[in-house]
């Protein structure tokens, strides 16, 4: 195993302000530094985007709690999720969750399409798997599910691609986020071998 395969070091930073309790991750002591800078810039930009979307600090009534979860930190891949819960009054608040998946050697952030071979119809394949799972789980939907978005939210955990939907995106609030873990072996025929899922095959 070479140094690039080692997990990256993560440091947690805490921001406490009026109506804000925020934890966010930063990659530290990483080589090359350009990759560290690229990953940390993407993380901070995503955290700030969540705050804006939740109305903080524009709405003085908005109270925000935010944290993160590490999903994968191995084989040159870092995958994590950023959580942001905001309450502005009413029956309940709203949580949004955004995921970032990086190549730790280059700092590149992957889009869903980057995980698959060029020209492969990954949207149709993943959509078919999710449609079958929705039927099995018998989840009442707010809208009919036909297909994922080409840029659908995802993260990588163990040997699975986890495709997920935001609160209210498909189902009522009570169902929260809808997660669909898909084994890398179920989609092995369309996985880009040099991409992050390809690294999880062996």
Image (cartoon, helix red, strand yellow):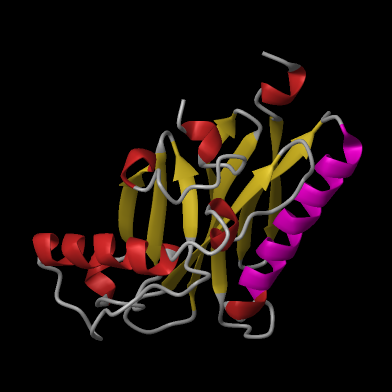
Q: Which contiguous range is marked in magenta?
A: 32-51
Q: Of helix, strand and loop, which mostly describes the magenta segment? A: helix
Q: Is residue 189 above or below residue 77?
A: below
Q: Quadrant of the N terminus?
A: top right
On the rendered structure, is 184 left or right of 16?
left
Position in image of residue 167 (x %, y %): 36, 72
Residues 16 and 44: in front is 44
Residues 122 and 153: in front is 122
* Residue depicted at 73% across the width and 16% down the height: 2
Position in image of residue 19 (x %, y %): 61, 68
Question: Is residue 177 something one can see in this rendering?
Answer: no
Q: Image quadrant of residue 180?
A: bottom left
On the rendered structure, is 129 left or right of 23?
left
Residues 199 and 72: in front is 199
Q: Image quadrant of residue 159?
A: top left
Is residue 38 located in the magenta-colored stretch of the structure? Answer: yes
Question: Is residue 118 something one can see in this rendering?
Answer: yes
* Residue depicted at 67% across the width and 23% down the height: 5
On the rendered structure, is 46 left or right of 95?
right
* Residue depicted at 75% across the width and 18% down the height: 3
On the rendered structure, is 198 left or right of 162?
right
Position in image of residue 165 (x %, y %): 38, 68
Outermost top residue: 1
């Amino acid at each position: 195993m070479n140094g690039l395969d080692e997990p990256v070091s993560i440091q947690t930073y805490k921001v406490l302000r009026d109506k804000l309790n925020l934890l966010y991750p930063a990659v530290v002591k990483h080589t090359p530094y350009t990759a560290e800078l690229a990953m940390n810039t993407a993380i901070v930009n995503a955290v700030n985007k969540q705050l804006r979307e939740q109305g903080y600090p524009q709405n003085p009534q908005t109270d925000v709690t935010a944290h993160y979860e590490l999903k994968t930190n191995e084989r040159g891949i870092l995958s994590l999720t950023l959580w942001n819960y905001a309450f502005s009054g009413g029956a309940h608040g709203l949580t949004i969750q955004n995921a970032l998946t990086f190549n730790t050697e280059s700092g590149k952030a992957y889009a869903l399409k980057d995980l698959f071979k060029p020209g492969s119809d990954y949207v149709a394949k993943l959509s078919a798997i999710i449609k079958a799972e929705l039927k099995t789980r018998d989840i009442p939907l707010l809208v009919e599910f036909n297909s994922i978005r080409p840029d659908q939210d995802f993260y990588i955990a163990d040997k699975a691609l986890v495709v997920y939907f935001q609160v209210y995106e498909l189902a009522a609030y009570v169902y929260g986020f809808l997660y669909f873990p898909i084994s890398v072996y179920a989609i092995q025929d369309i996985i880009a071998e040099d991409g992050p899922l390809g690294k999880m095959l062996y």
